[in-house]
Image: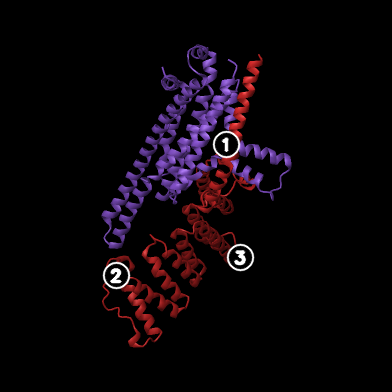
Chain colours: A purple, B red
Amino acid sequence: MNPLARIAAIARNTLLEALRQRVLNVILVFGLVVLAGANLFSEFSFDDQFKFIKDYCLGVMSLIGVIMAIVAVAQLLPAEMEARTIFTILSKPVRRWEFLMGKYLGVVAMLLLTLLLMTAVSAAVLFAQEHSLVSDAREGLARARDPQAIEAAKASIAKIAAAARDPWLLAAVVLVSLKVLLVAAIALAISTIATSMMFTVVVTSLIYIAGHLESTARAVWLDPAQPAGPAAKVFLAIVSILIPDLGVFNLIDEIVLGNTVTIVYLLKAMAYAGGCLTVVLLVACALFESREL
Amino acid sequence: MTSIASRRWRAWLAAALLLGGWGAFKLPLERALGAEQVRLRYGGARVTPEMRDLVSQGAAMALLSGFRGAVADYLWVVAHTYWEQREWFRMHRLMELVCLLQPRSVLFWDMSSWHMAWNIAHDARNDPDEPRLAKRLWAERKWIDAGRQLLQRGVENIPDRYELWARLAWLLDQRVGDHAAAAENWRRAASFPGAPAYASRQVGYQLEMAGKLDEAYRYWRELWAAHPQKSGEPFMLWDRIADRIRQLEDRLQIPPGQRLDTSGVRDHR
């Protein structure tokens, strides 16, 4: 059996275990119900509605995705140790890094399935809203007699369709997915040195928040004009070096607002996420190699 | 025992080297991405202690966790409840904050300035609790000015779309009465692709209202000359433009030989 087959076997098992876990299913169902309620903004104008629905859906996807990533990864190793299955697996010709990668890829598959499901529900909400607004606009079009009113109604229908079917939303979903996968990798690296599940959950959550403030820390550290003492500067330097800048994913806001997003910037953000992901996984493997089991 | 300890040290060293090496590599990359974000005007203002004081603890946590858009939407809904309760100052503070959180949102700048310059200003003028007219007029001017200032910050943040230029022009025309400035802003709005046809016409109307008749006449002629195929643009209302040109030619006493031939224009309404 080659390493890839071993990793695939562990990943498959991990995915099946994750799908059977009640806590993850409850979080997912909660997320889907919350997403389905996104058209509660229907009393606003259609510009507002689409912005709010998109913000809401992407926010829920991001939040539920991150929670599921942290919870799923945090219990991977403790559960294996408690059930003592890890010792059985590692006594076979399976390297530690293969075991860890298999576990991670299993969680990745579960997270991608979850995100796919949430994307489908979000798309359905957007479609339903589009359908309802276009029906109203069509009624207005049928009543219109003046050519200017007819043109305005047609423009309104086109605007509604463009707002609801913005292809850039897929790029936003990709960015949300990358962010979730990065958080899962960070949780995995933490869990290799953690002695409890709670430690992994708390530390990863703190890193997640710090990741959104990394750009501020970096700016204060690198700007000599900023008033910060030497100890603070050292702390900020450590934060800036060790923690990924999750503000890079703020591009999602621009996509929702319908502002021009450059492909080059998007690709750079994705490459940055890929780089962070690779390094964090390598660190996780290195730390897991040294763990006493 | 020694072997385990040395293996652990080696692993930690490898992890530290990996993170340090990546950190040294990622810093210039992050700075470049940050600079590009500033250049492309992505993202909003940094979260400050003042902002944190304005929002609830939960919203502050959400802000710090990267849910800027969702927090802005939530605060927008809260601001609307203040509108229903006629709590103008709270509404003003929240709308300023929402604009600061998402400065690239046309909707927030547009609606906030509209609330201030129209709705609140109107309410201030007709405040039943204030018997002094002078004070009510002063309050009205103050709110109109707040709306104008907000829109001016809006166009600084979104200078590359027509909407806020048009809104500012509209406000200057309807609420401030500065028609020359309105004409200038309509001109900016009309220069963007997707701008409505009336933006081009408004430049001429506003110049006329500002008393700049020569400039208005020149503008109308330039607009006329810039669109030789007039039949494909029904919403330009060329017949009305032709009316304006003829009226200005009479008022400015343009000699018959120098007048524009507008006779071929049909009513495209």
Q: Residue at x 46, y 22 (%)?
A: A102
Label at residue B135: 3
Which chain is indicated by disc 2?
Answer: B
Q: Residue at x 30, y 55 (%)?
A: A154
Q: Could you tell me which secondary element the residue under label 1 belongs to?
A: helix
Q: Quadrant of residue B266?
A: bottom left
- Measured in 3D between alpha carbons, the distance from the residue under mark 3 to the one under mark 2, in whole angstroms, is 50 Å
Q: Quadrant of residue B4?
A: top right
Which numbered disc, 3 or 2, marks the residue that appears first in the sequence?
3
Identify residue for label 1: B22
Q: Nearer the viewer, mark 3 or mark 1?
A: 1
Few, some or many C-alpha atoms within 10 Å of disc 1 (few <14, some 14-19, many ≥20)? Answer: some
Few, some or many C-alpha atoms within 10 Å of disc 3 (few <14, some 14-19, many ≥20)? Answer: some
Few, some or many C-alpha atoms within 10 Å of disc 2 (few <14, some 14-19, many ≥20)? Answer: some
Above/below status of A1 relative to B266: above
Label at residue B230: 2
